Amino acid sequence: MMAPLTVIGGDAAAPLFKVFHSALGKHLLIVPHSRIFDLPHDPDRDADAQVLPPSLVAALADTATGEVPLDHVVAPAPQSISLNVSSSCNLSCSYCYAARGSFQGAQPDPMSWETARAAIDKLLCGAERFSPVTVGFLGGEPFVNRSLIHRAVEYAAEQGDNLGLDVRFSVTTNGTLLNEEDVELMRTHRFAVTVSVDGGERIQNLQRPAFGGSRGSYERMVGATRPLLADPGLALVAARATVARGEFNLQERFEAVLSIGFREMGFAPLRSARADGGALRDEDWPEYLAEMIALAKAELERVYHGIPIRFSNLAVALKQLHRGASSPYPCGAGGGYFSVAANGDWYACHRAIGSPAFQLGTNDALDLNRRAGFLAARHVHSQPACQRCWARYLCSGGCHQEASNRNDSSCGFIRGWLEFCLAAYCELSANRPEVLDLGNAA
Amino acid sequence: MSQQTPIKLIPRNVAALRRGQPPAAGAATVPGNPASTRLESGVGNCFPGLECDLRNLERRFFPFLEVDIQDTEIDVVSVDIPGVQDAASNDQIPPNIAATYRQINTGVSQGQRWTITQMRGTYGPLGVRTLDIARLRSPSMGPDRLPPDAWTAIRLLTEGTEVQLTLRQGNTTRSLVGNRARYLDDNGALAKMFLPGELTQSLCSPWTHDFRDCGCFYWASNHPDIALPVLPAASPFPPPPEANLYVPWERKDRTINTLPEPATINVPVELSHYEINSQWQTLNFVLEGRETVAPYMPGGFTASKFANMAELVTNLRYAAGVELAVIHEYLAAAYSLRVVGVPAAAQDDVDAARDEIMRITYGEMRHIRAVNDVLRALDPAGFVPALGVASAVPATEPGRFNPVVPRAATPEAIQAFIDIEKPSIGVDGLYSRVLVTLEDLGSDEMRHTIRSVIADGESHFETFSFIQEWLNRHDPLDYLTKPDAVVALASNTLHQKLQQEYRSLLERLSNGYTLGIPAGASAINTARNAMLGPTGLDGAAEALAAAGFLVAFDRITDDARFAPVDHP
């Protein structure tokens, strides 16, 4: 186990367990390390705090062999980076956090080959040998800087071979600029391709217009992604939709996007945006939750008939619950993951390019003190609002960029969704365990 | 059940499994039987032997082959190619044999049928033979008899001896030579070639149609021929006698407002095949021998706790005394049964009764040890062995006690034994109170110890009921050496010899218990051995009984360790 930089103890009054229900009966979630048990059916006993001996709960909550204690702050070697290869985009989505890649002027120029290579070298030299290494491409629209992507992929793959590393790639793209060579690149390398698609033609064109505002992007996206969807090769392709307030219609969007040829799709609600940008408000969350659950139930119905899960949010949640995902951080920001700006600065997160608090190093070196400070401040035990929440190691406080918008309503959505997923997990694991046999659950 | 009863948690996700396991073990997919086959999920089966199908062993009788066996056919269903490659690379099989295995594997995987047509080997008592599998016939008699079918032939092959197979696919013929496989490894465990679940894969499930066809306690206990009827609503406890008569479970009359006619009155009118297939859901659940139509509620302990540790210890010491007292009574009864001179018609029943009373007595002996173990665990420093006999034992009515009276195994005596072993009253009631008190004052191990004593008591009760049934078929004069036998006078040398043996037994036990385990193991074992054989306690008791006296043990008043204990 890696030595911790520091240890941040949890709140002694924080709940260590939660009792929840599914169609099978009562279950117990041991909050630390997300252990799930079935509770016996006993009509004479309400299996909650009164009868679960504290010593038993404490023993179950203990860190087991091979698990990382949840109060440790560690700074592992970065295992994945994203390269902000482009500083511009051919679309102008209203909610874009990156201001089309320029990050409000913080990233005026695209990344150079020398900067990309230095970042890849730094990643590969420091990475742990036995886990996959990921090089991602972001922007702006990454494929605006197509030549750099191709060069970086060939270089990283070759260097990875030399070093005996399992190098993988990821890209988040609007899908409108893909050409034959791009598709072939993704087919022949292990690419996780996320295409930003918000729904069918109308909503896509409304929310994701081409830059200049004269026309939508739907048709170009469909046309350019078609060859990849038809034959993805080694690539795993998924659609990701941003949902703004006003109209959810998740089911309709889901069907529309799958009809294009995507095999899976996930949704992300818009939590922060400029004043008129359509971020969800308190009153929106119950409806959003209801639509997520309705979609998940419809999907589970199909799962029971042997059809793989296509709803990414559900699939990821079930997979995570199965292995007992439990972390004091919502993502790898500043830990195993960094985002490299076009100028070679290493940021904890791709959404924070240009934000000094997130700048933790450069292509030359990471600043361990800044990392330690960043990670300690963002540990879930350091979040007053999260300390006593039962979902604290599943949600882990949510996206750092959006933490300031967190409130009872948005947290209520997270807890509601998790509670639904917990029950769905138990039912599925009892009735269709093979669906959860994901091979790499450890 | 009390609030302190441990909660049984069943792990559901990998993280839950990982707690207390090596990390890799939690995530591994384990092939084999589903959770529903765990003992606790299973149903009792009236007919032993249905837990696995031993015929599946023969499916892997030949190295690297799995075969399907029908009457006079043996077909290859799979080839263990990794095993073949491993053996070939270690020069355990020659290249041409490995090539044959591969050829068969390729064929089988493409849907070709490879059949074992001839098998040469050592067939146990039938010696070395070459068998044409398709020509085996049943019956086969006389000195040149052959196994009647393929399975018997394989079963007869002597473990480890060479077997030559001729295999055919279409016009292609191949030979293989190997040794008949060992089904068990050196530790007696199933050989690794068997996959989890393989031995049970062919077991049948009781289909509804079969409920009707197969009778007489063949099926699992939840699909019986007869069961106790559903208890009438608001039934008193204990239930009325008419609710304790067995009724046909598959009866045609499915009305529930009246008690069904007992199965013994008339030949029961049962559901026909068609009806049982279409109305199986009207058959009632059977739990604990009784049809149940309401949600099942397990019974709980209602026993009251002892006030404190001192009261618990006093009662445990008394419990040990009660065990000793009933041992006195049971031994007197057992040795009163005739060993010789029993009419032939009664012989089996009398032998069985005597053996069973002795078996129960051994159980009570173990209980003495169990109670002493609990006493020692409760207070290791202050432990003094509890080996004083109870002056009186609990009677059927709460708060009443009966004196300890050695007597022959008369019908009255057997009834008294049934009463003392009755669940929830008598001795069992005493242990129930001990158990609930231990939930506060004792450990899990102590509770398990007492639970097993209680469980034994339930089986003793049942066994005495059987003994009563067996002996009641006969005249006491036929099975008792002397129905009115009395205790011998103190001057009787046989009686004195018995007392010496008994006293020496108690001394050894006291020493052993005082030292504890492991230091006292030797003394305890010596005590056990000294009870056996013609020169031991058994021999002394036999001699006294043969002389027409009761096997009885005198009160010990000159040694505080073995002095009688009164009920608290």
Image (cartoon, coloured by chain):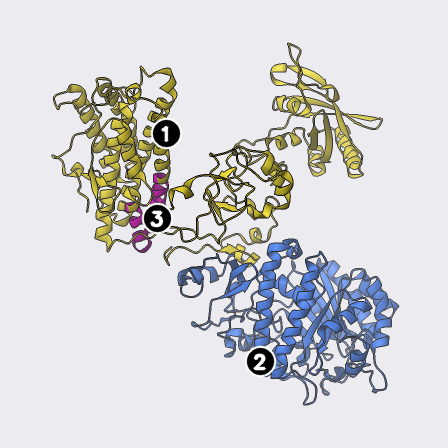
Chain colours: A blue, B yellow
Q: Position of residue B309 (x, y in %)?
A: 24, 53
Q: Which residues are magenta?
A: B430-457
How far apart, in angstroms, are the residues tagged by discs 1 and 3? 34 Å
The residue closer to the viewer here, A49 or A290, is A290
Badge 2 marks a residue whose secondary structure is helix
Q: Tag 1, which chain?
A: B
The residue closer to the viewer here, A334 or B366, is B366
* Residue B452 forms part of the magenta stretch: yes
Q: Which residue carries the number 1 mark? A: B469
Q: Position of residue B336 (x, y in %)?
A: 26, 23
Q: Tag 2, which chain?
A: A
Badge 1 marks a residue whose secondary structure is helix
Q: Which amino acid type is shown beneath numbered disc 2?
A: Ser
How far apart, in angstroms, are the residues tagged by discs 2 and 1? 73 Å
| Disc 2 and disc 1 on one polypeptide chain | no
Image-based side of A239 in relation to B433, left or right:
right
Image-based side of A21 in relation to A165, left or right:
left
Query: Mark 2, mark 1: which one is toward the viewer?
Result: 1
Residue at 67 percent across and 28 percent down: it is B62
Q: Which residue carries the number 2 mark? A: A409
Report if residue B527 is visible in the image.
no
